[in-house]
Amino acid sequence: MKRKKTKHIDQDSSVRHRQSHSVRDRLPVVLFLLCFSLYFLTSSGIPISGDEINQYYTGVAIFENGNIYIPKNIAQLYTYDGKGYTIKALPGNSILFIPFHILDKIFPIRLNYRAIYYWSGFKNVVFGSLVVLFVFLLCMRFYDGDKKLSFWLAIYAGLCTYFWYYTKTWRYQLTITFFYLLSFYLIYQYKTSGKKKNLFWAGVLVGFSIITMHLSAIFGGLLALYYGYIEFKVKGKKITNVIKDIVIYFGIPVAFSLIIIGYWNFLRWGNALYIEPPMSYFNRPEEPWKIPDPMPNIMLMPGHIYYYFLSPTKSMVVLVPPFLLTLLGIKRFWKKMPPEMLFFSLFILSTMIFYASFRDYVWGDVGSAGFRYFVSLIPFMVIPSGFFIQRFKESDLYNKYKKIWRWGFIGYTAILIILNFTLASMNYREYRMCQAIVQKYPDYDPMHYWDIRTSEYFIFYNRFLSVLERKTGIALPRFPLVKDDVFNECPSYDFSFWWARPYYNTFMSFLFWVSLILMLYSVRYLYKFFKKFKSA
């Protein structure tokens, strides 16, 4: 009897182990589906700026006509030899619109917004979900396969920061975040696998990042130095071989990208060396702008860096809460992973210092919540926070009040998800445009950064509830004393969801229910995962 009982127990144990293992293996896929469904449901599907419209039409022109001419009635372009060109951005983001434009051709659905097709509006929904997935995969490598910690850090990166808002835009800042993260992941994987194909693909991604945004060269240079440090210091290779590999795997893709940029500039400006339009193009009758972009001013840097870390409304510690834990755990990060700590720190600091010298680019523009030029920093600010979390969980302070800390964490996470959901749900551009029209545009008022009542999170939470009350009659408690200067002039009348528009049809209804089912499916499996994880 004992043998049979033992055999029965072993079989049950084996079944439970396989089921648990099966559930855990699905975790990356479920995480991707959860973020994809949430991003898809909160997306607007339409552009928020002339930059995005120009980049979209340039991609269409490249695919359909083999040129970069765009319609002359589109904003923010200039005409040369009777043709229209975009004045904004490099070709990378336009090229990425092409697969979505092909999908538009196969399943043509329009939103009746400047004749722009529907599917192209979800480009960043895909790339944003992939970023969250690779945050999880990288954390798994950083923290020795700790699925629970990796999952929560991925959730914080994707749903508890203003990263969520940018999944509904068409901007390239979120796209290059994916390229940055994947290229670093490949180099870090090479550290243990030694596969040269990782270097090749990392170089290709860096090259494509550069033809999407000029400043990706900073990231590419730091990544090449990180690779060189690994090969020379960690693996002990000769410096000549390291330099040769850097030239082959990073130098050639970068050189190729520079050739593409030069040709792109030549087609638009008639000179391969012009990054921006030459001054001779300004103030011409056919151009819609009057002055060039602002020049850097080193005197602005100390004040702006001060805001980055200490402002109660706009600092990165507020916009990306795990960044504070990263700063607190930087010593442990250095002890465990010196090359990675140097790379993360230099990338974050170099990006901050560069943008701190610009007045107009301090926080963004009319269509930018938070600070769009720091979106690519969010994963690199969140991932190292796990070192502090691991250390804190070993402390007596945590173990003594474990239940309180856990419930506090759950409550704080829920609050952050709600605040970022409401920010992503409203028409941010409409709010900012109204500020400009009624001349209550506080970007250059230093006190704006120190008055917590002006926090965009509080403002848009209250605006979300005002719309909800207008539509359903349900009145929920709002943040008191919030300073929304333009609420009376420009109240919010509707959510900015694609499925909340008057051109909502049967097929869109089908998409809505599919994405909702995916979200519920993901939640179900996450519940199953944590339940089995707890009992394991």
Image (cartoon, rainbow, N blue to C red):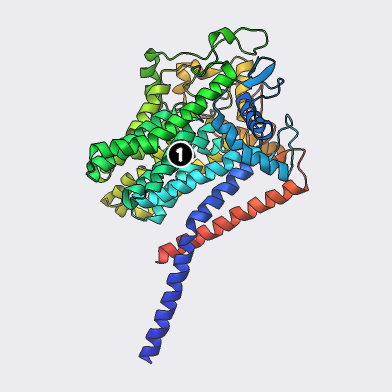
Q: Whole-percent x and y of residue 512?
A: 68, 49
Q: How busy is the neighbourhood of tag 1: few (under 14 within 10 Å), some, or many (20 plus)?
A: many
Q: Which residue is drawn at 51% across and 32% down?
A: 173
Q: Which residue is drawn at 28% across and 44% down?
A: 337
Q: Whole-percent x and y of residue 68?
A: 63, 26
- Give the camera-side residue of 319 and 18: 18
In the rendered image, is residue 477 in sight?
no
Q: Vertically, is 297 above or below 243?
A: above
- Give the camera-side residue of 405 and 420: 420
Direction bottom: furthest residue: 1
Q: In this view, does 330 lie to the left or right of 481?
A: left
In the rendered image, is residue 402 in sight?
yes
Q: Which residue position is annotated with label 1? A: 204
Q: Whole-percent x and y of residue 233?
A: 23, 41
- Give the camera-side residue of 423 and 200: 200
Q: Is residue 297 left or right of residue 244?
A: right
Which quadrant is home to the C terminus? bottom left
Which quadrant is home to the N terminus? bottom left
Q: Is mark 1 on a helix, strand or loop?
A: helix
Instruction: State which quadrant residue 59 falls in.
Output: top right
Q: Is residue 159 left or right of residue 59?
A: left
